[in-house]
Each structure stands twice: as C-alpha cells, then as structure tokens.
Amino acid sequence: MGKRTRIINDPSYLVPLLRTFGSRTHKKVFDALSSRWMTKEEIDEFMGADARRSLRILKKAGLLESQWRVPELGEKPSKEYHTSYSKVQVNFQSSFEDLSDIIMLTFKPYEEVQGVIEELEKQVEEGNTSMSNLTRTLNKNPFYICAVARRSERLSVMGQRLKLIEGNEENYE
C-alpha cells in the first residue's frame, strides 16, 4: 500500500470521513482494501454481503482508487479497488458553531437531514450551483453547504461549485 497522506484543509471534508469510519461495515471494507487490491466480487465475498454502498462512500470520501485487473485468457477484465491513503493530516480553523453543525450533519439519521439535503439538491438541479449564490439563497455559510453536499449521495463539491453526480459515474459492478 502506498503511504500517501490525505491533507484536509476544509472541515466539511470530515463529513464523509467520519461517516466512513463511524460504520463498522465501511471501516471493514476500508481495512481490507488497505492491504490489497480486490474486485467488487472479492469484497462482497469477504464481507458476506453487497459492498456497493461502502464503495460509494469510500469513493465520495476520496479514499478509493481503482484500476482494471488483467484477466486470465478468455475472461472479461474486472475493476479492482484499493485505498488511496494510509494517513491523514488535518489543518483547519473553525468556529465551534460551524464544527458542531458539521458534526451534527454527519451523525444525524438521514431522515432528520433529508429536508436540508433535498433542498440543496433541488437548488443545484435548478442551476444554482455557485457557492456564493447558494449561501445567499439558503442563508447558510459555505462550510454548512459543503457539509450538506458531502452528506448527499447525489452532490459533489467542485471548488466553489456544486455538481450533481451522474447515476452512471461508477456502478461498482
């Protein structure tokens, strides 16, 4: 495994990381992929269940890389996965109010944050993708909006813009 370090300068990046390591299932997938490359089928077999959701969350957290496995003669190529980082370095300053909002967004059940997530997704679907416009429209600060976007399975933060994640970007088959 490469000894790369994930550098976090924005507190909203904690949302996918804490969600990943707050789940035994996602943590187990991460640990397995830390030591070797595995296909989706190998991960499913290791876990004893479908690991598609764990792979999506690891990808969204920026912790997953993939490559094509060279097949045996007559077989189809398959995608295999591995973790991208083995260390983390956190370097940011935040108010306790912003940090507490981010932690609350991370650990609240989906049903409790669903309305906020759906409102942000609706704004982005309607073309309001600029962080400055979203902060004015929703009357929230950029940290909060980024944290909500990182909690959403349909949104991606791209610098100062939000983007809808296409359904076919990665299907983990």
Image (cartoon, rainbow, N blue to C red):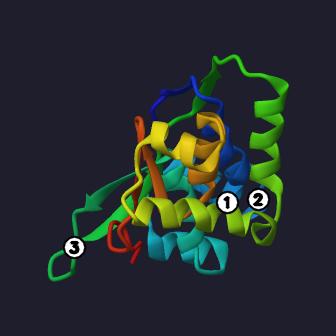
Question: How crowded is the residue under tag 1: few (<14 C-alpha within 10 Å), some, or many (20+)?
Answer: many
Q: Are marks 2 and 1 in contact (CB under 8 Å)?
A: yes
Q: Nearer the viewer, residue 73 or 62?
A: 62
Which residue position is annotated with label 2? 23
Can the viewer see residue 84 in this picture?
Answer: no
Q: Position of residue 100 (x, y in %)?
A: 83, 37
Q: Nearer the viewer, residue 28 or 122?
A: 122
Quadrant of res 90: top right
Using residue 127 as the reference point, say whether residue 131 is left or right of it.
right
Q: Position of residue 48 (x, y in %)?
A: 66, 79
Q: Secondary structure at mark 1?
A: helix
Which residue position is annotated with label 3? 72
**In the rendered image, the vertical position of residue 62 relative to residue 94, given as above or below:** below
Instruction: Please state, as top left, top right, bottom left or bottom right, where the C terminus lies in the image.
Output: bottom left
Using residue 57 as the reference point, say whether residue 81 is left or right of it.
left
Per the rendering, the mark at residue 88 is: none
Work out whether mark 2 precedes mark 3 in sequence or the reverse, and give the earlier one: 2
Q: Are marks 1 and 3 in contact (CB under 8 Å)?
A: no
Q: Position of residue 71 (x, y in %)?
A: 22, 70
Q: Secondary structure at mark 3?
A: loop
Which residue position is annotated with label 1? 26
Residue at the spot 50% in from the left edge and 67% down from the top edge: 122
Can the viewer see residue 91 in this picture?
Answer: yes
Q: Secondary structure at mark 2?
A: loop
Extreme-left residue of the structure: 74
